[in-house]
Image (spheres, coloured by chain):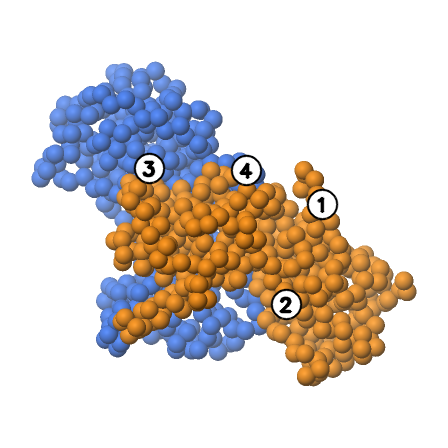
Chain colours: A orange, B blue
Amino acid sequence: MKKLVGAALLGQSGGPTSVINASAAGVFLESLKHDEITEIYGAQHGIKGILDENFYDIRKEDVEELERLKYTPSSAIGSVRYKLKDYKKDPTDYNKLLEIFKKYNIRYFFYNGGNDSMDTCLKISKFMKTAGWEMRVVGVPKTIDNDLAGIDHSPGYGSAAKYVATSIMELYLDATVYNTQQFIIVEVMGRNAGWLTAAAALASVGGVKPDLMYLPETPFDMDKFYNQVGELLKTGKSVFVVVSEGIKTAEGKYIPEYETEIARDAFGHANLGGTASVLANHVGEKFGVKTRAIEFSLLQRSAAHIASQTDINEAFKVGQIAVKKAINGTTNKFVGIQRVPGDKYKVKYPLLPLKIVANAERKVPLEWILPDGQGLTQDFIDYALPLIQGETKLEKVNGLPRFAKLNKVLAPKK
Amino acid sequence: MKKLVGAALLGQSGGPTSVINASAAGVFLESLKHDEITEIYGAQHGIKGILDENFYDIRKEDVEELERLKYTPSSAIGSVRYKLKDYKKDPTDYNKLLEIFKKYNIRYFFYNGGNDSMDTCLKISKFMKTAGWEMRVVGVPKTIDNDLAGIDHSPGYGSAAKYVATSIMELYLDATVYNTQQFIIVEVMGRNAGWLTAAAALASVGGVKPDLMYLPETPFDMDKFYNQVGELLKTGKSVFVVVSEGIKTAEGKYIPEYETEIARDAFGHANLGGTASVLANHVGEKFGVKTRAIEFSLLQRSAAHIASQTDINEAFKVGQIAVKKAINGTTNKFVGIQRVPGDKYKVKYPLLPLKIVANAERKVPLEWILPDGQGLTQDFIDYALPLIQGETKLEKVNGLPRFAKLNKVLAPKK
């Protein structure tokens, strides 16, 4: 393979995770090791930063701080939600990218994100090839949703799953403490895939089993739900429910949407709120029980203090491998994670075609979901438990996390 | 002091904290060391469990599990919200208690809770003295609200404060990641005292300063708030606000109450929701900015995985000292925490009269609160920072917390 000399560029895209910066650390620290890489840039806010030529000069950062990125949540150089158009329909952005890549001699492009970001990689890779600009484009996967196709699991999922399972254990102890009955409902992220909600089932390994759990993979039957809750309330005990934000009725309506229509018909006004709070309000009205709706909200994707060290290591690794492989000639691929069969958890990192992940969506297998909100099978537990192992090595100063502090020096515009 | 031989009884009361069980561990493990203590009982659901004679036999527990109580959140033997009446008005409960104390020869009574629980201790102590039943009653303080009078701080506060400060750091990194503007508002517990909301200011030690912070100690001026938010939004940056659930207008109305009236007048229906979500909705409508309201809800008082080891140690100590001092003749007191003056953080545990804490409420000193939501003074940081030091020694199994598992054997009724 011919040596390709030029600048490397990393972009971060989409919703943050606790370990997206661990992948950045992998890309940056590995890039520092290779003579082929002349400059190391971090795009401010992903594609947006590239189009605006806002590049952080990563060589101006302390290596110690780059190491700390492993334990720092969110997207240190800024994220973006920006979907490139089809270049056959509108090549404006692509021509601009080509011009900038040439100007800064960018020969290595790494993009860290979910399905959309892999699609961005694919489009850029194709366009640059057609345009005759030699470069290596490698995707680095991430998402707490764990919905990327073609891989065993996504970096970011393990840490979010550890947060969910731990918090469910703690909340359950709190919520069932009184001698009076309560209805507690927890809402977990995941618009279409229930992986993160399923992680609540891991709490059972620690001795806590939610009474009911609902994933978006199966239709949510409102009447059945009320009946089940009603039966559970008859025991006199508190009832603890976990729902995905994305559960839908058989007609394909999200709960707040569905309820809004009902409410509008009945009272002439909309019932605002998330899935959990809508259901909690209704259970309260129907059964006269004290209710509490809890949303994990942004906490579940940013709680780096309880990240899985397994996840951190893997996130770092996919970044590192992206650079190593690109140096060796790989392009138009993303770094996958595959589980090596055997008793002990072990993974390998194959390079996979971008098109298998771009815009695809992997859901929880239906055979892992028990009927009637009864939780997940042992197969799911066996799958997910290894991903939450290991405690983060996040350093603490003054009793608080010592996250990375970057200098964020913008490279002079050319 | 004459030796008093008999059973010891612990009750847990009020809202849970991450370390209330650490105090239980202190009471139980210390009680095991003293010959004077014949039986060790844990009341199921506090006073309620006493009146129902539901006593867990703590001698039937493994010492190892009692040690693990130090790291287990919530109230392991069950909590209650039950306020004893004035015995001059209605002595029913007290006569029942006397009968039960005699029947089980309960000579040591420890009650772990907040202001109300100290009031319960005071009433029981007085009544038993009048009734001629010799016993030692010692209160053990706890509350995440940190509003107990007469002491430097309450067990439970340090851990909740550590959770708040850490989560604010993490959320801030997440919430400010995009190139698009957002309005994020976080709601922290504390109906009348703003100590826990103030803990968000500790995040500044870690480099994160919320744009605006509002405590219930000062009246909340809605118009001023909108003006301030409007000014901040003009900078183009995301705006990050922290509010106490208990902030009130100058007329003494909580925000959801106040807004409900406004909404009722305007649209004929109530605007439900917590303080943060009400304010977020209004900011969204007024400024057309994307908003997100986050409630820490029960997480802030149950997140034992991020408890402060300083807090755990102190909570254990107040339980331990309660027993030691009771054995030595102390009664009608509670175990306080006082800071020893000097450069290094150090506390002592004086026995204090119950009446100074019963039904009193200690608020954040006004001189520590900066005007116009600008946060807290350095005096507050100096006060609170030592309380969040030290990482919990909570054991993990399978990547999940290994909380105490009690046998919970009920003592036979007499």
Three-letter code for the amino acid on which mark 1 is drawn = Val
Q: Is residue B6 above or below residue B258?
A: above
Quadrant of the rendered structure where residue B86 is?
top left
Dots 4 and 1: beta carbons under 8 Å? no
- Mark 1 burial class by Cα count in 10 Å: few <14, some 14-19, many 20+: few
Question: Residue A412, how many percent across, how many down?
Answer: 73, 75
Q: CA distance from mark 2 to mark 3?
A: 49 Å
Chain on which label 3 sits: B
Which marked residue is nearer to the observer: mark 2 or mark 3?
A: 2
Dot 1 and dot 2 within a common chain? yes
Which marked residue is nearer to the observer: mark 4 or mark 1?
A: 1
Residue to which mark 3 is pinned? B78
Residue toward you, A197 or B400: A197
Three-letter code for the amino acid on which mark 4 is drawn = Lys
Q: Earlier in the sequence, mark 1 or mark 2?
A: 1
Quadrant of the rendered structure where residue A393 is?
top right
Q: CA distance from mark 3 to mark 1?
A: 45 Å
Three-letter code for the amino acid on which mark 2 is drawn = Asn
Chain on which label 4 sits: B
Quadrant of the rendered structure where residue B90 is?
top left
Q: Earlier in the sequence, mark 3 or mark 4?
A: 3
Q: CA distance from mark 3 to mark 4?
A: 24 Å
Chain on which label 2 sits: A
Q: CA distance from mark 1 to mark 2?
A: 26 Å
Residue extending furthest left? B89
Q: Which mark is residue B396?
A: 4
Residue to which mark 2 is pinned? A359
At a point 71% along the width and 56% down the height, the residue shown is A336
Q: In the structure shown, which secondary structural element does the residue marked by tag 2 occupy?
A: loop
Q: Which mark is residue A340?
A: 1
Q: In the structure shown, which secondary structural element does the residue marked by tag 3 occupy?
A: loop
